[in-house]
Amino acid sequence: MATVEKMPMLQEGYEKLSSELKRLKAERPLIVDAIEEARAHGDLSENAEYHAAKERQGQIEASIADIEDKLSRAQVIDPRDLSGDKVVFGATVTLLDEDDKPVTYQIVGQTEADAKTGRISYNSPLGRALIGRRVDDEVEVSVPAGDRYYVVSKIEFV
């Protein structure tokens, strides 16, 4: 029997996916109306509106199925309930790079990751390298730009 892999995420990520699912489900009837209207125009083989509406319907249905799958496997984690001296999912980690310049990242789920805002996936190369580390541990990570070296300077659960 196959096991269903849980998908860890923060409450914020769960709510964002839920609202996106509601938005897509609300768009469904509009697409059906667009298909009906395009169908009323006659010959479907040369009807660009019909083909565009059918393509959009396929995209929406695929997105709905994907989001419903993610939500069904969601394991919502609140970092404030966590503690310890190791980097785990939800932890906010301050690293010192090779120039002793601090950089801070929060370890989040795949759907929540956004490196520009300091949120990296637990599945990213840096995220995988950080999981299980403690303060003062050295971390080496291979990225497309080359190998990077960090030292864990602080672990917080906020």
Image: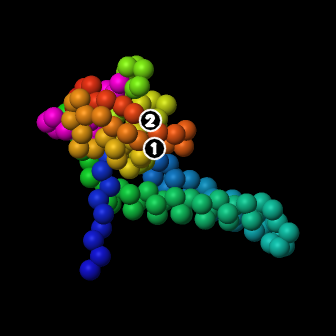
Q: Residue at x 30, y 50 (%)?
A: 8
Residue of label 2: 148
Name which residue lies at 35% across and 56% down. Answer: 71
Quadrant where the C terminus sits is top left
- Which residue is labeled 1 in the image? 142
Magenta: main secondary structure equals loop
Closest to the observer, 63 or 124: 124
Mark 1 to mark 2: distance in Å?
6 Å
Q: Secondary structure at mark 1?
A: strand
* Image-based side of 54 in relation to 41, left or right: left
Q: Residues within 10 Å of mark 1 (few under 14, many from 20)?
A: few
Q: Is residue 101 above or below residue 134?
A: above
Q: On the picture, is 48 further left or further right than 33? A: right
Dot placed on the residue nearer the N-terminal end, 1 or 2:
1
Q: Looking at the image, can residue 37 be seen?
A: no
Q: Quadrant of the N terminus?
A: bottom left
Quarter holding residue 30 = bottom right
Q: Nearer the viewer, residue 96 or 10?
A: 96
132, above or below 61, in the image: above
Q: Do residues under tags 1 and 2 come within 8 Å of each other at their CB atoms?
A: yes
Q: Is residue 112 magenta?
A: no
Asked which secondary structure carries label 2, the reply is strand
Q: Which residues are magenta?
A: 82-96
Residue 153 located left or right of residue 67: left
